[in-house]
Amino acid sequence: MRPSSSAGLALALGLLVGLAGCGDDAGDSDDDATGGSNATGGSSGSSTGGSSTGGSSTGGSSTGGSSTGGSSGSSTGGSSTGGTGGGELCTDRTGGALVDFAVGAEMLRVWIEDDAFIEEAERLLQAHEMRVPVFNTLLDGRDCDEQWTWHPDPADVEFADFTIELCDGTPSYIEENKDEWLSDVGQFCPWSAEVRAVSRQ
């Protein structure tokens, strides 16, 4: 009986050792599984810290895009400066109108006291049409446009559909040849003139 008892004891110990081994393997697999999930958690963490923080929402177009440096710059440096010919001169006058003309790439502001001319200038502006302004008498000296040292007689003006070519030109050409123009031509009729503003005062 003793040998069989010893064999039974050995079998029982073997079973206990086997069970203990299985427990370790289970623990190892659990650890591995936990470690795996940690690895998964790591990858999810990297995806969270990815595009949302360093992506387009912070460094994208909303901050560095066109809204900051876009059209506001053009509105500041746009037509408000180039829309008139010369400063704020003659703004205290009454009984007439300041009329701004674009003559090619140049601007000309004149003081006008002829009602028919002012009304026609207003009509041309509203209709986006062009006629030739005829300044029949040019006078020496700066007036309402600080760019030029000559100005038209405010009462001796009219509009025409056609004029002689001799009086056509640009304000800068008259300025550069003022003495000759005033003595030999005397009038100014720029064919390319377009009314840009009419301000009655």
Image: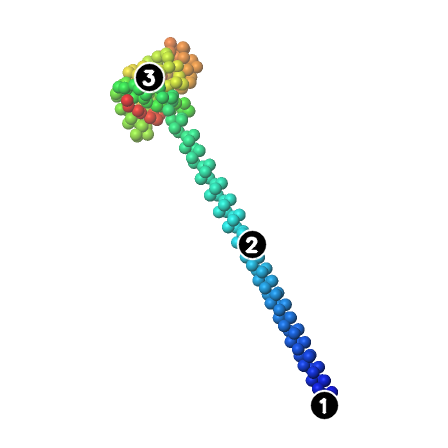
Of residues 167 and 151, which is closer to you in this image? 151
Apparent side of residue 171 relative to residue 116 in the rendered image (left or right): right
At which x and y percent is residue 3?
74, 87
> Could you tell me how many numbered marks the image carries?
3
Quarter of image, res 162: top left
Q: Residues within 10 Å of mark 2 (few under 14, many from 20)?
A: few
Q: Nearer the viewer, residue 65 or 185?
A: 65
Give the secondary structure at mark 1. Answer: loop
Name the secondary structure under disc 2: helix
Check whether the beta carbons of the residues at disc 1 and disc 3 lie within 8 A of each other: no
Quarter of the image with the N terminus in it: bottom right
Which numbered mark, 3 or 2, is in the foreground of this view? 2
Circle 3: is it few (<14), some (14-19), or many (20+) Cα within 10 Å? many
Q: Nearer the viewer, residue 182 or 5?
A: 5
Q: Which residue is mark 2?
A: 46
Q: Quadrant of residue 123?
A: top left
Q: Residue at x 42, y 31 (%)?
A: 76
Outermost residue, top direction?
183
Q: Is residue 117 left or right of residue 32?
A: left
Q: Amino acid at mark 3?
A: Phe
Mark earlier in primary sequence (3, 2): 2
The image shows residue 167 at horizontal and vertical percentages of 37, 16
Question: Label 2 sits on what residue type?
Answer: Ser
The residue pinned by badge 1 equals 1
Q: Secondary structure at mark 3?
A: strand
